[in-house]
């Protein structure tokens, strides 16, 4: 069984989280039988988070110093973005998150960062000399922030650089979830899932 961890920061956007839980959930029901074994779990440094637009999500698993190695076996780490006004950047220097990113990066495992989640990702200092993007609107203020890190900025909606996948906004989260599903399964499988979800 393959496993994907969706890391929840306070103030994360529900749509960006749901893009992964829903696409992979559908896969496990309608996808090709040999690929119906991908588990997506929400994890966090706290038991529950308040989403950007309201609503509270309880993390399926709490990741702590004492159990962090349990998550090293996961195949992908997903970081949804969120709004600063909803305290999304408040805990960006969380040590547990840094250790997870370090492990996934050093072992060339899939890391996905959506929209402003890219800021929290590069803030760890573990992503270097990789092509990335982030939110491109709002006078490119988030995109311009990337220039102070040791990364290669690309003004595109989706950027893939080996094991690092980044995108610029909520709509791209859906596209990126399908891209990761294709990476973990097959093109034939992704077309089946898209058809069943009425995705064009």
Image (spheres, rainbow, N blue to C red):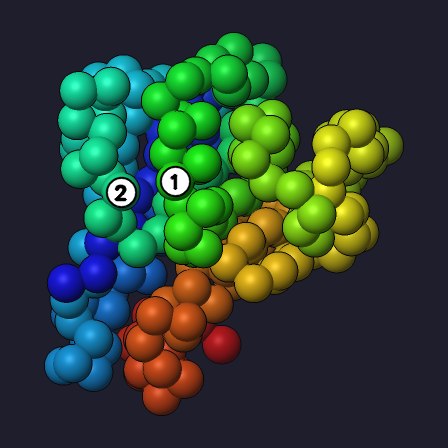
Estimate how packed mark 1 is, as few (under 14), some (14 to 19) or many (20 or more) residues with alpha carbons within 10 Å. some
Occupied quadrant, residue 54: top left
Badge 2 or badge 1: first in the primary sequence: 2
Estimate how packed mark 2 is, as few (under 14), some (14 to 19) or many (20 or more) residues with alpha carbons within 10 Å. some
Residue 95 percent across, percent down from the top left: 41, 18
Please give the count of numbered marks on the rendered protein.
2
Residue 177 percent across, percent down from the top left: 43, 59
Occupied quadrant, residue 23: bottom left
Residue extending farthest bottom: 188
Closest to the observer: 130 or 78?
Answer: 130
Q: CB under 8 Å between callouts 2 and 1?
A: yes
Q: Is residue 146 visible?
A: no
| Residue visible at 40% across and 45% down in the picture | 104
**Circle 2: element type:** helix
Disc 2 and disc 1: Cα gap in Å?
Answer: 7 Å
| Residue visible at 40% across and 74% down in the picture | 182
Q: Which image quarter is the N terminus in? A: bottom left
Residue extending farthest front: 106
Q: Which mark is residue 103?
A: 1
**Circle 1: element type:** helix
Q: Is residue 131 visible?
A: yes
Residue holding disc 2: 72
Classify residue 160 as left or right of residue 110: right
| Residue visible at 47% across and 67% down in the picture | 179
Closest to the observer: 151 or 143?
Answer: 151
Classify residue 12 as left or right of residue 126: left
């Amino acid at each position: 069984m393959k496993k994907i961890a969706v890391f929840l920061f306070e103030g994360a956007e529900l749509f960006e989280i749901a893009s992964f839980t829903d696409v992979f959930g559908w896969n496990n029901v309608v996808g090709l039988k040999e690929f119906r074994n991908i588990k997506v779990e929400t994890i966090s440094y706290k038991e529950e988070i308040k989403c950007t637009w309201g609503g509270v999500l309880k993390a399926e698993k709490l990741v702590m110093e004492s159990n962090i190695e349990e998550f090293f076996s996961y195949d992908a780490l997903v970081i949804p973005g969120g709004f600063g006004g909803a305290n999304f950047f408040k805990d960006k220097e969380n040590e547990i998150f840094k250790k997870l990113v370090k492990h996934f990066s050093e072992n060339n495992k899939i890391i996905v960062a959506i929209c402003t989640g890219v800021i929290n990702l590069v803030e760890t200092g573990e992503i270097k000399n990789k092509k990335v993007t982030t939110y491109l609107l709002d006078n490119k203020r988030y995109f311009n922030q990337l220039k102070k890190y040791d990364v290669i900025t690309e003004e595109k909606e989706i950027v893939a650089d080996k094991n690092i996948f980044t995108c610029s906004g909520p709509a791209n989260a859906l596209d990126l979830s399908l891209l990761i599903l294709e990476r973990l399964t097959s093109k034939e499988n992704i077309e089946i899932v898209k058809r069943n979800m009425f995705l064009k």
